[in-house]
Image: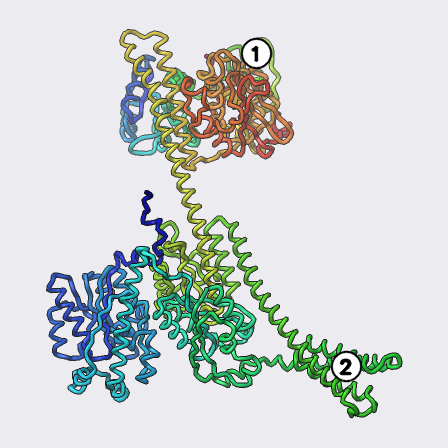
C-alpha cells in the first residue's frame, strides 16, 4: 500500500508540482490550501505524511504542527523560506520531523520524506546498528568501523555520532545534541563545533568536508543517509 | 557705436528703494487722511471716499469708525458693512476694540480704520492700532485711516511746544512714509466756527486745555505742519521712485545726520529733533550713544533713558550705534568721521558750572573741534541733582588701608632721610618725599595722593626744614617745595586714573572682542544644529547675563525651542505668540519692542538675508528690560553671528539632502537597469528552454532551465538581502562557527557557480572557531565564491585560504583572472558597482560584493579587496578581528 501524503500550500502551482512529483514517486496525494482545510483533510484522510507550508493565508503554519502531532502519527515536513532559521528550529521543537527550504530540490524533498517515513515505520525502536556506505556504527557496543578498520572516537565524539546515527538522514538541532551529550554540564556550541570537526577529521578525511555530516546552518546537523 | 545698457550708465538702482518697492507688492496700500486738528472732517472724508469706492464695486468694510453721534457722519456709515468690534474687559470697564481677526477672516479689499494713533486695550496683540493696521496691510488689505498732525511722532514736540498740549498717542513716522497722504484741510476760521456750533467732538476732561489749543494762531501753525508733512511724504516717495529706477542724482550715500544721545532726561527730544532734521534733508540718520567709563556707574534710570532713546530712534527709522570711548568728545568725533556725517544734533546739558569747569563743555569743544560738521544744539531740561550725587563713587575718597599705607610710607621715608641726613642735602630729602606722594597718588587715587602730599610736606617741614622741630616756613623756597609735592600728587593721580580708566575700557573692549572671537571660533567647529543652538544660548547668556532661548523650525515643522540657557524654561502662550510673530514677520517682538510687549521676553529674528532662520529670545533674570542699551550692539552682533552659523548649518543640511537624493537616484537607476537586465536574461532563457521541452527534453535544455533558475534565485536572494541591509532589519545571531565547516557548506551550495574551476580549500582544521552569524557568513561566502567563479578565467583554480595571524584571522578567496583596476580596489564593494572591462560580458548584479561588505561589517569583520601578490588575479579577504576569535575549549569538554 502506498503511503498517503497531505500537501498543504496556498499556491496552486506548487500543489500541482508536488502532486506530480509525489504521484510519480508512488505516493497517494491529498491537498489543502489553508489551515482549516488541512485539519479537515487530516481528520478525514489519515495521511501518513504532511508537507506543510508555514506561510498559510488563514493561520500561522507553526501553530498547526502540534495539532497534527496530537491527532495522529503522520510525519510532518515543514516547508519554509530560506532564512527563517528560528522558524525551522521552532517547528522541529514543536514536533516536526524535518524541514525543506524553499526553493527546494524535488529529489531532496523525496529523500527527506522517504527517510522520515522509514523512521516512522521502524516503530520508534532505535536501530542497534547503522550502516552508511563503508561506515558501520554499532550503537550498543559503541564502536565505529570504516571497512575493517576500527575508528577510535573519544567519548563525546561517540555520543554525538550516536545521536546523529539514531536519526540518520534527519536533522538534529544543536540544542538536542547539546542536551543529550553534555547534559547537566555547561553545554556550549563551541564544544559541539570542535567535536564535529574532530569527527569529520576521522570520518570524512580525505573526502570533502560535509560528505558524511551535513551542517544545517543555524539549525543543527544531519548524518547524510546512503546516497 | 557702443550701445550703453541701462545698467552701465553709472546710475545704479538703490537696493533699499527696490526692496521697499518689492515689499509693497502683494501688500495692501495705506491711505491716511491727515488733519491739522480734531474736527476738520477726516472721518467724514474717509467715509465719503469709502462709500464712493463701494459704489465703484470695491469690497469695502468699516473696521472701526468713531462718529461721535454726528448725523452726517452716521449717515455715511449706513451704506457700508461694519465688522462688529471686539469687547475687551479691562479693569471692570468694557472697551470696544477693532476685531483684527474678524477683518482678516472677512478679507475685504478695503477697510476703513479711524484714529490710527489709538492705543489698544492692554493685552491686545498690538499695543497700538497702527500695529493692527500693519497686519491688515501685510495680509494684502487696503486700509484708509485718519491721523491728526499732533499725533505724528516726530512732530509731537513741535506741536507741544506751541500748543502746550502734549498727546501721548503717537504714530511712528515710518507708518506715514509708506502711506498715501491726503490732507483734510479747512481754514482755521471755519474750524473755529464749527467748534462754536458744537460740531466738533471733544473729550469732556480735555475741554479746558483744548480751548487754548483751538486758537487761530495754533490752528494756522498746525495746518502748515500738516501740509508740509504731506508734501514731504510725496517728496519721499518720488525720491524712492527715482532711486529704484537708478536715475542718478547727486545724493551722496554716506551723508548722514548723527544725534548724540546721553543719559539725561530729554534724550528722546534730541532723537525727535534729529528725525526732523533728517527728514528735511532727506538723509539717513543715526542715534549714537558714547559709552564712556562713566557709563559703568549709571543708575538704572539712566540706563533706561538711553535704552528708551535708542528704541525711539529705531522706531523713527534711524540707525543706532553705541561707541565706547574715553570721553564724549573723542567718541563723537571718531563716529562722525566713520559715518561721514555732515550734521550733528546735540543737547546742551544743564550741568553744574563746577562740572563744566572740571570737564570742559562738551558742546563748546565739539563745535570748536569739528569744523566740517553743522552742529545743532538743543537745550535739555535741568537734570536731577540728587541723581547726580547718587552717582558719585565713594571710592574716590580712598580706603582706610590706603591712608594707613601712605602714612607708613611717609614715616618710612622720614626715617630713611633722617638716617641719611648727614650725607644728603635738603633738596635731595625733598626729592625723596616724592616717592610716597607718587606711590600713594598712583595706587590709591587723588585724595589719598593729596593726603600724602600734605603729610610729606608737613613731615619735611617739621623734621628737616630749619628751624627743625617746628612747622614754620622761614623762606619762600620751602613754600615751593610744599606746592610742588601737592602738585605732583594731583598730576600723578590724574595721569594714573586716566591710564587705569583707559586700561579698563580697553580690557572691557578686548574682553568683548575676545568673547566674540571665541564664540565664532568655537561655533565654527560645530556641525549639528542642537550643539550650535546650545552654544549660542550659553554664550549669549554668558556675555549679556540674560536668560536666553533659541527657537527654530526644524524641517519645516512648527517653531520649537532648539535650546535654552535654562533647559527647564518653558514659554507661555504670550511668549510663544511673540516668538511666532518675530519668526513670521522678521521683526523683533516682545518686551521693549512695539509688538506683544506684554511678553517677558524680547525676541529677535535671526535672519540671513530675507530668510528668518530662527528667533533668539532674551529675558532679564531680574525681570527688568531684557538688554541694556550699551549691550544692544553686542546683542545684534551675536544675533548676526548666530544667523551666519544657522545659515551655514542649513546649507550643509541642504547639501547633504541633495547628495542623498542624488545617491538614491543613482542607485535607483542602477537598480532598474540591473533588474531589467539580470532578471530578464535568465527568465528569457528559462521560457525559451521550457517552450522547447514540448519537442522532447534534452539534457542541455534541462541544464539550462536549472542553471538559469538558480541564477534567478541567487539574484532575488541578493535583492532581498540588500533590502534587509538598507531597511536596517539585520538581526544578528552570533554563535561559534567552524570556518572549515562554513566554507565547505558554502562551496557545496555555490557548486554551480564554481563549475569549471578547480576549487582548493586551504582551511587548516586547527583554525580556531570564530563568532559569526552562520546565515550571514554563508551569504558572504556564497557571494565571494560566486564572484570568483564569474571573474576567474575559465578553467583556472580558485583557492580559499584561511590563516590565523596574531590578533586576526583571515579568510581569503583568490581567483586567477583580470584582477581589479589598481587604485580602485575598494570601489568594488559599492552597490551596483561593476568595474569597467569586466562588466556585462559576465553579467553580475553588482549587488553581491556590497552585500558581502554590509554583512561582514554588521558582524564586526572587515573586508579587503586587492590584487594577488603575483598580479594573477583578485583576492577578497574577510578579516576576523581578535574579538571574534573564540578561544579553544578545554580538551575535557570535547573528548
Q: Which residue was labeled with disc 2?
A: B410
Q: Is residue B853 above or below residue A153?
A: below
Q: Nearer the viewer, residue B370 or A146?
A: B370
Residue A94 shows in the view: no
Dots 1 and 2 on the same chain? no
Asked if the residue under mark 2 is in contact with the one under mark 1, i.e. CB atoms within 8 Å, the reply is no
Q: Residue at x 38, y 38 (%)?
A: B661
Q: Nearer the viewer, residue B250 or B347?
A: B250
Q: Quadrant of the C terminus of chain A?
A: top left
Question: How many numbered discs?
Answer: 2
* Residue B326 location (% of width, % of height): 56, 71
Element type at marker 1? Answer: strand
B477 vs B519, left or right, is: right
Tell me if residue B566 comes above or below residue A20 in the rendering.
below
What x and y, as percent, mark residue B552?
A: 40, 55
| Residue at (41% x, 58% y) in the render | B606
Mark 1, Cα crowd under 10 Å, few <14 / some 14-19 / many 20+, is some
Q: Position of residue A162 (x, y in %)?
A: 53, 21
Q: Nearer the viewer, mark 1 or mark 2?
A: 2
> In screen coordinates, is B44 left or right of B519?
left
The single residue placed furthest to the right in the displayed view is B422
Judging from the image, mark 1 belongs to the subunit labelled A
> Viewer-proximal residue, B219 or A210?
B219
Q: Residue furthest front?
A: B1
Q: Position of residue B553 (x, y in %)?
A: 38, 54
- Name the image colouring: rainbow
Q: Secondary structure at mark 2?
A: helix
- Quadrant for residue A207, please give it: top right
Residue holding disc 1: A146
Amino acid at each position: 500500500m502506498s503511503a498517503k501524503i497531505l500537501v498543504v500550500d496556498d499556491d496552486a502551482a506548487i500543489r500541482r508540482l508536488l502532486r506530480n512529483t509525489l504521484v510519480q514517486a508512488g505516493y497517494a496525494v491529498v491537498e489543502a490550501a489553508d489551515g482549516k482545510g488541512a485539519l479537515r483533510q487530516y481528520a478525514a484522510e489519515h495521511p501518513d505524511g504532511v508537507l506543510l507550508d508555514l506561510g498559510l493565508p488563514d493561520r500561522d503554519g507553526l501553530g498547526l504542527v502540534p495539532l497534527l502531532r496530537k491527532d495522529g502519527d503522520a510525519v510532518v515536513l515543514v516547508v519554509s523560506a530560506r532564512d527563517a532559521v528560528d522558524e525551522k528550529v521552532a517547528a522541529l521543537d514543536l514536533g516536526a520531523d524535518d524541514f525543506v527550504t524553499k526553493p527546494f530540490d524535488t529529489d531532496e524533498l523525496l529523500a527527506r520524506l522517504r527517510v522520515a517515513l522509514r523512521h516512522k515505520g521502524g516503530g520508534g525502536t532505535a536501530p542497534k546498528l547503522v550502516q552508511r556506505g563503508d561506515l558501520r556504527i554499532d550503537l550498543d557496543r559503541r564502536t565505529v568501523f570504516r571497512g575493517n578498520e576500527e575508528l577510535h572516537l573519544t567519548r563525546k565524539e561517540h555520543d554525538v555520532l550516536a545521536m546523529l546515527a539514531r536519526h540518520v538522514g534527519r536533522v538534529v538541532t544543536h540544542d538536542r545534541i547539546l542536551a543529550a551529550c553534555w547534559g547537566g554540564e555547561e553545554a556550549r556550541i563551541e564544544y559541539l563545533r570542535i567535536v564535529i570537526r574532530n569527527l569529520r577529521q576521522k570520518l570524512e578525511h580525505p573526502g570533502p568536508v560535509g560528505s558524511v555530516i551535513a551542517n544545517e546552518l543555524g539549525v543543527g546537523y544531519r548524518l547524510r543517509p546512503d546516497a | 557705436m557702443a550701445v550703453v545698457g541701462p545698467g552701465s550708465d553709472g546710475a545704479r538702482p538703490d537696493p533699499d528703494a527696490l526692496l521697499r518697492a518689492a515689499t509693497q507688492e502683494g501688500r495692501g496700500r495705506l491711505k491716511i487722511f491727515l488733519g491739522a486738528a480734531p474736527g476738520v472732517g477726516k472721518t467724514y472724508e474717509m467715509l465719503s471716499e469709502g462709500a464712493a469706492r463701494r459704489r465703484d464695486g470695491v469690497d469695502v468694510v468699516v473696521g472701526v469708525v468713531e462718529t461721535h453721534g454726528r448725523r452726517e457722519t452716521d449717515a455715511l456709515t449706513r451704506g457700508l458693512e461694519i465688522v462688529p468690534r471686539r469687547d475687551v474687559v479691562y479693569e471692570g470697564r468694557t472697551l470696544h476694540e477693532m476685531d483684527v481677526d474678524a477683518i482678516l477672516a472677512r478679507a475685504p479689499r478695503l477697510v476703513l480704520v479711524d484714529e490710527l494713533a489709538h492705543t489698544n486695550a492692554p493685552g491686545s496683540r498690538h499695543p497700538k492700532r497702527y500695529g493692527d493696521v500693519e497686519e491688515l496691510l501685510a495680509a494684502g488689505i487696503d486700509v484708509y485711516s485718519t491721523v491728526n498732525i499732533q499725533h505724528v511722532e516726530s512732530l509731537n514736540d513741535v506741536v507741544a511746544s506751541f500748543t502746550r498740549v502734549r498727546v501721548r498717542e503717537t504714530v511712528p513716522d515710518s507708518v506715514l512714509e509708506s502711506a498715501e497722504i491726503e490732507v483734510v484741510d479747512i481754514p482755521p476760521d471755519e474750524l473755529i466756527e464749527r467748534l462754536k456750533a458744537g460740531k466738533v467732538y471733544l473729550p469732556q476732561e480735555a475741554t479746558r486745555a483744548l480751548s487754548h489749543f483751538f486758537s487761530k494762531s495754533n490752528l494756522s501753525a498746525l495746518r502748515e505742519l500738516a501740509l508740509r508733512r504731506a508734501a514731504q511724504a510725496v517728496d519721499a516717495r518720488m525720491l524712492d521712485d527715482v532711486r529704484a529706477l537708478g536715475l542718478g542724482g547727486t545724493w551722496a550715500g554716506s551723508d548722514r545726520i548723527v544725534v548724540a544721545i546721553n543719559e539725561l532726561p530729554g534724550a528722546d527730544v534730541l532723537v525727535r529733533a534729529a528725525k526732523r532734521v533728517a527728514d528735511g534733508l532727506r538723509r539717513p540718520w543715526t542715534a549714537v550713544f558714547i559709552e564712556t567709563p562713566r557709563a559703568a556707574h549709571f543708575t538704572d534710570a539712566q540706563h533706561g533713558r538711553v535704552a528708551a532713546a535708542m528704541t525711539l530712534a529705531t522706531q523713527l527709522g534711524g540707525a543706532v550705534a553705541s561707541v565706547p570711548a574715553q570721553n564724549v568728545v573723542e567718541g563723537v568725533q571718531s563716529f562722525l568721521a566713520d559715518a561721514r556725517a555732515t550734521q550733528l544734533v546735540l543737547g546742551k546739558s544743564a550741568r553744574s558750572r563746577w562740572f563744566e569747569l572740571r570737564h570742559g563743555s562738551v558742546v563748546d569743544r565739539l563745535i570748536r573741534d569739528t569744523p566740517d560738521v553743522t552742529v545743532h544744539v538743543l537745550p535739555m531740561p535741568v537734570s536731577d541733582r540728587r541723581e547726580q550725587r547718587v552717582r558719585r563713587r565713594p571710592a574716590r575718597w580712598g580706603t582706610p588701608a590706603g591712608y594707613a599705607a601712605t602714612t607708613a610710607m611717609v614715616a618710612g621715608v622720614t626715617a630713611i632721610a633722617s638716617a641719611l641726613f648727614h650725607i644728603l642735602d635738603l633738596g635731595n630729602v625733598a626729592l625723596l618725599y616724592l616717592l610716597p606722594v607718587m606711590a600713594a597718588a598712583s595706587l590709591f587715587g587723588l585724595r589719598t595722593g593729596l593726603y600724602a602730599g600734605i603729610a610729606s610736606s608737613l613731615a619735611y617741614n617739621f623734621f628737616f626744614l630749619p628751624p627743625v622741630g617746628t612747622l614754620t616756613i622761614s623762606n619762600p623756597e620751602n613754600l615751593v617745595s610744599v606746592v610742588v609735592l601737592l602738585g605732583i600728587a594731583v598730576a600723578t593721580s590724574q595721569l594714573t586714573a586716566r591710564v587705569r580708566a583707559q586700561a579698563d575700557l580697553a580690557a572691557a573692549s578686548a574682553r568683548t572682542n575676545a568673547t566674540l572671537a571665541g564664540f565664532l571660533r568655537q561655533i565654527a567647529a560645530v556641525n549639528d544644529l542642537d550643539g550650535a543652538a546650545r552654544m549660542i544660548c550659553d554664550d549669549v547668556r554668558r556675555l549679556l547675563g540674560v536668560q536666553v532661548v533659541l527657537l527654530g523650525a526644524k524641517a519645516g515643522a512648527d517653531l520649537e525651542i532648539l535650546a535654552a540657557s535654562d533647559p527647564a524654561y518653558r514659554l507661555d502662550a504670550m511668549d510663544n505668540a511673540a516668538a511666532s510673530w518675530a519668526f513670521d514677520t522678521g521683526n523683533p517682538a516682545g518686551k521693549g519692542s512695539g509688538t506683544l510687549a506684554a511678553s517677558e521676553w524680547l525676541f529677535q529674528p535671526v535672519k540671513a538675508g530675507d530668510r528668518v532662520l530662527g528667533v533668539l529670545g532674551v529675558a532679564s533674570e531680574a525681570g527688568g528690560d531684557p538688554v541694556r542699551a550699551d549691550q544692544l550692539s553686542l546683542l545684534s552682533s551675536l544675533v548676526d553671528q548666530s544667523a551666519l552659523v544657522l545659515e551655514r548649518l542649513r546649507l550643509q543640511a541642504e547639501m547633504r539632502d541633495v547628495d542623498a537624493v542624488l545617491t538614491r537616484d543613482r542607485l535607483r537607476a542602477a537598480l532598474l537597469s540591473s533588474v531589467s537586465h539580470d532578471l530578464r536574461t535568465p527568465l528569457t532563457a528559462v521560457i525559451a528552454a521550457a517552450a522547447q521541452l514540448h519537442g522532447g527534453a534534452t539534457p542541455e535544455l534541462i541544464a539550462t532551465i536549472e542553471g538559469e533558475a538558480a541564477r534567478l534565485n541567487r539574484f532575488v536572494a541578493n535583492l532581498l538581502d540588500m533590502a534587509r541591509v538598507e531597511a536596517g532589519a539585520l538581526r544578528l545571531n552570533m554563535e561559534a562557527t567552524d570556518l572549515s565547516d562554513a566554507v565547505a557548506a558554502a562551496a557545496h551550495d555555490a557548486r554551480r557557480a564554481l563549475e569549471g574551476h578547480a576549487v582548493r580549500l586551504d582551511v587548516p582544521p586547527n583554525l580556531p572557531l570564530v563568532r559569526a552569524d552562520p546565515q550571514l557568513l554563508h551569504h558572504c561566502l556564497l557571494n565571494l565564491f560566486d564572484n570568483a567563479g564569474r571573474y576567474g578565467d575559465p578553467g583556472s583554480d580558485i583557492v580559499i585560504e584561511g590563516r590565523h595571524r596574531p590578533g586576526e584571522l583571515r579568510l581569503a578567496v583568490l581567483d586567477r583572472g583580470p584582477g581589479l583596476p589598481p587604485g580602485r580596489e575598494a570601489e568594488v564593494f559599492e552597490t551596483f558597482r561593476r568595474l569597467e572591462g569586466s562588466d556585462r560580458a559576465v553579467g553580475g548584479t553588482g549587488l553581491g560584493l556590497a552585500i558581502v561588505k554590509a554583512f561582514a561589517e554588521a558582524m564586526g569583520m572587515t573586508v579587503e579587496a586587492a590584487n594577488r601578490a603575483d598580479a594573477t588575479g583578485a583576492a577578497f579577504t574577510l578579516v576576523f578581528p581578535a574579538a571574534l576569535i573564540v578561544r579553544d575549549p578545554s580538551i575535557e569538554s570535547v573528548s
